[in-house]
Image (tube, rainbow, N blue to C red):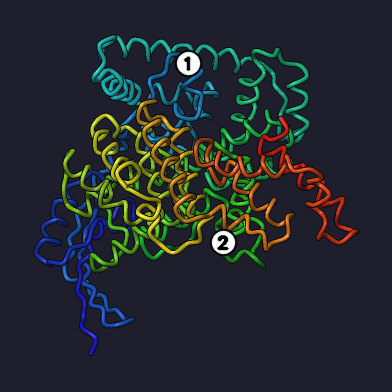
Amino acid sequence: MVGKRESFEVLACRDGRWTIETSSASQADAEAFARKVLNGQGVSGVKVVREVARGDTARETVVFEQTRELRDSGKIFVNDIDEAPYCETVEEIYAARGRQTLNRLFRAYLDKNGVTATEVMHDFRELRRLVDADSLMASGVGKVATLQAKGRDDTDTGKRRDVLYGFLDEITVRARSASEKKLPSIRAEGFEAAVARLVASASPDQCDYLLRVMVARELVQQRSFFGKLAQTMDWAEPAQDDRTRVLVDTFTSDILANAETLQDLLGLQPTLGAALGSLIDLAQGRFENESEGRPDDSPEVLAGRLNAMLGLDALPDSRAMLVDRVRRQLEAKSPLSKGEPEQETEAFRALIDKLMPTDDLFGGGAIAEALTHRQSRILNKGGVAGLKEATGRLLPAFADPARKAGYLLALTESRLVDSIGDEISQQLESLFIRPESVKQIVKDNRPPNKKMQTLTTVVHKVRGSGLDDRMKSRIADRLDELLASYIVDDRILERVDDPSRPLHVRAFMLLSMCTPEMLPEGKASQLARKIVVKHLKRPNFETELVADVPPAEKERVLRDFHVQLYRCGFMQ
């Protein structure tokens, strides 16, 4: 007999669209939360939906609903933000992280007017409209100044506000000056021809800025974000030189800050977890949808074109914008799934696997931080103590030692390192310094070469990380010692250099143990290198090496052997 599962979803209506706010196991709690949500800005209605699931079927019933009439004042507010890069020059505001901040800060204004942050900064008329829009600019500058001055001794909010207004003045002067220039028209000449003519005529120090002005003039005429994206994709696919690719990427990344455009591209998604999974796939160029037979201007076809460009690493700023969206959604309170807590955990684990299919965490420190925050919410424990516990509780989800190291080392590059740095160090020590053998670290039954490769991957990750040099040395040296002991205790080299095997087979296997992927530079690799050197010193070694090789293959085997010797550093 399959038991029933009951849950209550709270939905809110904003701008005529219903979205899920949270879910609860209690109808009373859900209704209380709904009443609070109804008082929120822009919320015109709330309802509680009771879902009863039995097996694979589910039935939904609205058990509570309230609406209210909103007075449309037409006033737009500046969004709250959790971080803003501390820009030293105006050029940093034009760059990716600066634009990310502006796109979040002025999201409501940009969405309402169908423009992007880059368009506003480069089109003088649009810039003046934003500056003149009530107190938006003053509010935005104030929020950023307060955020940037927090915890710093070299400035305060007032001083930082003055600096930001100075940047605004500089952006305005440049936009006003550019508005008086006659630039090539993309609409009249075509994108590639217009770019080529401007590059040929503009001074080098003004060229990139004027190219952005030229593109902004074209895109500002298109007030649909979806239409803007279709246009930039038309420009991106034939783009050959780095300058043009950067130009297209700049505007595409801003367009992807619009939530409705992303929803159109991803299509209908059953849960937030599924939507984030699709967004991660898109950011990595792995998104799949049914586009065959669809019109060229359909969301499915456009998503496929964007996916292809992201898969070619042609749009790094656009990928960063999508990663930032994933980060903020992971850190938010909205549930990833509908239903029981077990389903929430499963959805979270599925996202982890998408973000870290191998041993590199997609999105780096920002995503590591977001995963840790999400885990602390699942544990329902806040503060530093909750984040520390979340760090330890997350590790089993990564399973493989190299993946665990990747997560912890990514955390050292996040904002959390200042508050939970000691916990990160303790976890690294527990994983890689305290164990007494390789088998205590790699506990599954993978073959010896895979065990060695796993620990070698960890060594390389540690050496290339931001850990302090002392901690790097402790982990790398300890793992090298364990690898050396493993090679000796398990007689790895004796088994590889078995005289019953042909010499060329043994030689290539020995050389494989000298590669950087198999063993790190140190004691363990020296054990293998000594045996290789011993073989190389044998009289007539090369003749013996190919003695068992068919005549037609001898030359190729010798050539491949010398290539491998060079790669392993024996001929340098």
Q: Which percent across, then down, holds residue 163?
A: 37, 11
Q: Quadrant of residue 540?
A: top right
Instruction: State the residue in front, 270 or 31.
Output: 270
Left or right: 405 in relation to 316:
left
Left or right: 190 in relation to 256:
right
Q: Which percent across, then down, holds residue 314?
A: 63, 40
Q: Amino acid at mark 2?
A: Glu
Question: Is residue 122 shown above or below 291?
Answer: above
Instruction: Give the quadrant of the N terminus.
Output: bottom left
> Which comes sooner in the sequence, label 2 or label 1?
1
- Residue in the picture at 23% in, 32% down: 419
At mark 1, the secondary structure is: helix
At mark 2, the secondary structure is: loop
Instruction: State the residue in front, 255 or 98.
Output: 98
- Mark 2, residue position: 288
- Mark 1, residue position: 90
Q: Which percent across, then down, holds residue 107?
A: 39, 37
Question: Is residue 4 shown above or below 293?
Answer: below
Q: How many marks?
A: 2
Left or right: 317 in relation to 155:
right
Does residue 327 appear in this view?
A: no
Q: Quadrant of residue 10?
A: bottom left
Does residue 458 appear in this view?
A: yes
CA separation, marks 2 and 1?
Answer: 39 Å
Q: Quadrant of residue 324?
A: top left
Question: Is residue 194 shown above or below 330?
Answer: above
Instruction: Give the quadrant of the C terminus.
Output: top right
Cβ atoms under marks 2 and 1 closer than 8 Å:
no
Q: Residue furthest front?
A: 539
How crowded is the residue under tag 2: few (<14 C-alpha within 10 Å), some, or many (20+)?
Answer: some
Q: Amino acid at mark 1?
A: Val
- Residue in the picture at 29% in, 44% down: 434
